[in-house]
């Protein structure tokens, strides 16, 4: 494990090392929630239903390293994919940096603690349910930006 460069998050995404790329993630868990797409409008609707590997109490993946073996459609974000994926939350560090915007004030790289993200309501920890018990996704629609 190498050292992270000072203020590496201000660099272009394609200049980051793999370790820096991984460290950029704030761990909010929103990308691990199921989304529904309206067939008529293409609009993306968020739910509070988490992937079976997401620990709903901490919003951390329970087997991040091997997640693709258990959830084949889990997306491995890359700098190119960040530009294409429409459903990333507006607070996503990858999305913000790809657009040249700064990290949110609550981001742990700025505050030194993930508590600020929890206090800002930007994390799904304790506010989501596993897909293993959720039932129909249509009953779990939410607007995380308004919660």
Image (cartoon, rainbow, N blue to C red):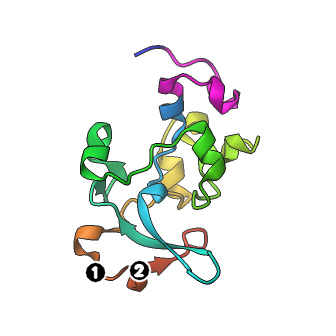
Q: Quadrant of the C terminus?
A: bottom right
Residue 135: numbered disc: 1
User: How many labels were placed on the picture?
Assistant: 2
Label 2 Cα crowd, 10 Å radius (few <14 / some 14-19 / many 20+): some
Q: Is the residue 99 above or below the residue 35 in the image?
A: above
Q: Quadrant of residue 144?
A: bottom right
Q: Is residue 93 visible?
A: no
Left or right of 98 on screen, residue 128: left
Instruction: Inspect the magenta stretch and tell me whether residue 10 lies in it.
Output: yes
The span picked out in magenta is: 3-20
Badge number at residue 140: 2
Counting other residues with Cα less than 10 Å from the Cα at mark 1, is it few (<14), some (14-19), or many (20 or more)? few
The single residue placed furthest to the right in the displayed view is 100
Disc 2, SS: helix
Does the rendering let one see residue 86?
yes
Q: Which mark is residue 25?
A: none
Q: Residue at x 46, y 47 (%)?
A: 27
Residue plotted at (42% across, 63% down): 33
- Horizontal side of 96 relative to 74 (left or right) equals right
Q: Are marks 1 and 2 in contact (CB under 8 Å)?
A: yes
Q: CA distance from mark 1 to mark 2?
A: 9 Å
Q: Residue at x 47, y 48 (%)?
A: 115
Residue 76 x, y percent position in the rendering: 45, 43
Q: Residue 106 placed where, x, y %?
A: 60, 47
Q: Secondary structure at mark 1?
A: loop
Q: Is residue 50 above or below residue 40?
A: above
Q: In the depicted view, which residue is nearer to us: 41 or 144?
A: 41
Q: N-terminal of the two: label 1 or label 2?
A: 1
């Amino acid at each position: 494990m190498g050292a992270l460069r000072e203020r590496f998050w201000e660099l272009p995404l394609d200049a980051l090392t793999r370790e820096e790329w991984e460290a950029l993630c704030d761990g909010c868990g929103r990308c691990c929630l199921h989304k529904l797409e309206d067939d008529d409008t293409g609009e993306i609707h968020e739910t509070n239903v988490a992937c079976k590997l997401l620990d709903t109490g901490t919003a951390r993946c329970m087997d991040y390293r091997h997640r693709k073996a258990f959830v084949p459609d889990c997306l491995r974000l890359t700098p190119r994919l960040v530009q294409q994926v429409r459903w990333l939350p507006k607070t996503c560090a990858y999305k913000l940096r790809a657009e040249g915007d700064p990290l949110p004030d609550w981001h742990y790289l700025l505050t030194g603690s993930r508590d600020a993200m929890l206090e800002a309501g930007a994390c799904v920890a304790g506010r989501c349910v596993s897909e293993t018990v959720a039932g129909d996704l249509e009953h779990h629609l939410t607007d995380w930006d308004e919660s």
